[in-house]
Amino acid sequence: MPLKIGELARLTGCQVVTIRYYEKEGLLPRPERTGANYRLYGEDDVERLNFILRCRLHGMNLAEIRDLLAFKDNPTVSCAWINELVEKHIADVEAQIASLEHLKKHLEALRHSCEGDRGKGCGIIHSLDHDEPCPFCDAKPCPLHERTHAHGDRTPRHGEAEEEHAPKK
Amino acid sequence: MPLKIGELARLTGCQVVTIRYYEKEGLLPRPERTGANYRLYGEDDVERLNFILRCRLHGMNLAEIRDLLAFKDNPTVSCAWINELVEKHIADVEAQIASLEHLKKHLEALRHSCEGDRGKGCGIIHSLDHDEPCPFCDAKPCPLHERTHAHGDRTPRHGEAEEEHAPKK
DNA sequence: TGTAGTGTCTATAGCGACTATAGGGTCAAG
DNA sequence: CTTGACCCTATAGTCGCTATAGACACTACA
């Protein structure tokens, strides 16, 4: 009982267009087709797609998932790199959390800087307009204040993953 | 003493291309030019760009910053919406933190499911391959497990802001 | 005066992971 | 025989930049 793409979508909770996108990206194999050129999927495809979606929910990107699928399809001796991948993601997630916690403090301070209808004297605008020393960064320099007058170094924005871009070639 | 674009960049810690991008997006006004068509900036531009960068670090997107700048340029009676904007961002940041904390638990569980060189029996792959009940979600349904067999509703992925898209027209 | 090095200009394409749109074909029910 | 749900391909748009190409401008040193 092969499935049409919409049925696979319902089964997995994935969008139809996303399934086609994963196929184009080489994460899902090109499926059989009906006479009317409709895609037909089997049990394997359901499992593979679920694996992909679970990885996505674990914060992995498509390149990493491709690697995991390749390993799954053809397991080589060592899977130590998978452990490293997971460790890297944990570190990444921790960094994001720390950054967001910090940001939250700033936003809360911002919220308290205005009580509403003050017209042109809005306290939030005022706070955003002037660099004051960061009350939340004692030891480490706060990116919200350290940014200014920096020379050459790019401070990563909040929410950005800090991947180390290996120089190509 | 007007500044060339590179000097403005050094002063603010912003990339030259980004300054030009902000101009194209209407966040910065089109500056004067030298005879050689070089952009020339003044003190106002330094302040405006710093305002923009501070907003970006507070997690605001360019559309929101455009609104804030419009208010700053031409303050209307009420600034209550700015408070709401900040509240929304706080809620957003809190949701992201919660989601990441949850994800972290899953990743840590994943890490402990494999001790390394087990070849084709890698425990991480195995864990990713099978839906087991989420040990971290007692009351609320865990998105990592609830996703499957959903009908129609799209569960947002980690790291996605949950904006309510008003249907256009 | 030549030239090397740096800075500036415009225009265009690429990133990631989708999402949206246009314009069409297929199929079952009423 | 028409309606509506589903499927197909191809292309462009999203966001906030980043990278590339190709050309012009300016300064310092020979």
Image (cartoon, coloured by chain):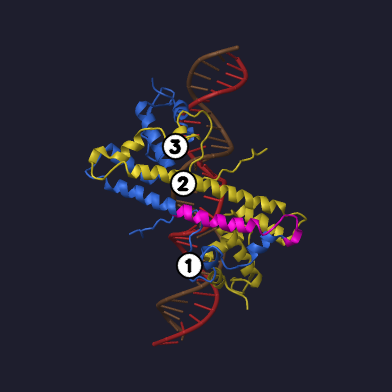
Chain colours: A blue, B yellow, C brown, D red
Q: Residue at x 32, y 43 (%)?
A: B112
Q: CA distance from mark 1 to mark 3?
A: 37 Å
Q: Residue at x 37, y 31 (%)?
A: A47
Q: Residue at x 29, y 42 (%)?
A: B114
Chain ID of residue with mark 3: B
Q: Quadrant of the C terminus of chain B?
A: top right
Q: Amino acid at mark 3?
A: Leu
For this rendering, which residue is in front, C19 or A114? A114
Mark 3 or mark 2, which is nearer to you? 2
- What crowding class fits label 1: few (fewer than 14 Cα within 10 Å), some (14-19), or many (20 or more)? few
| Residue B5 painted magenta | no
Q: CA distance from mark 1 to mark 2?
A: 25 Å
* Residue that sits furthest to the front in the current view: B138
Q: Is residue B29 visible?
A: no
Q: Position of residue B64 (x, y in %)?
A: 63, 53
Whether the residues at callouts 1 and 3 have beta carbons within 8 Å, the answer is: no
Q: Residue at x 45, y 43 (%)?
A: B102
Q: Position of residue D28 (x, y in %)?
A: 47, 84
Name the element at disc 1: loop
Q: Position of residue B53 (x, y in %)?
A: 58, 62
In this picture, which residue range is highlighted in magenta?
A: A95-121
Q: Is A54 left, or right, of C30 in this rendering? A: left
| Residue A100 painted magenta | yes
Label placed on residue B101 = 2
Q: Position of residue A94 (x, y in %)?
A: 43, 52
Name the element at disc 3: helix
Please name the residue that numbered disc 1 is placed on.
A139
Please name the residue that numbered disc 3 is placed on.
B144
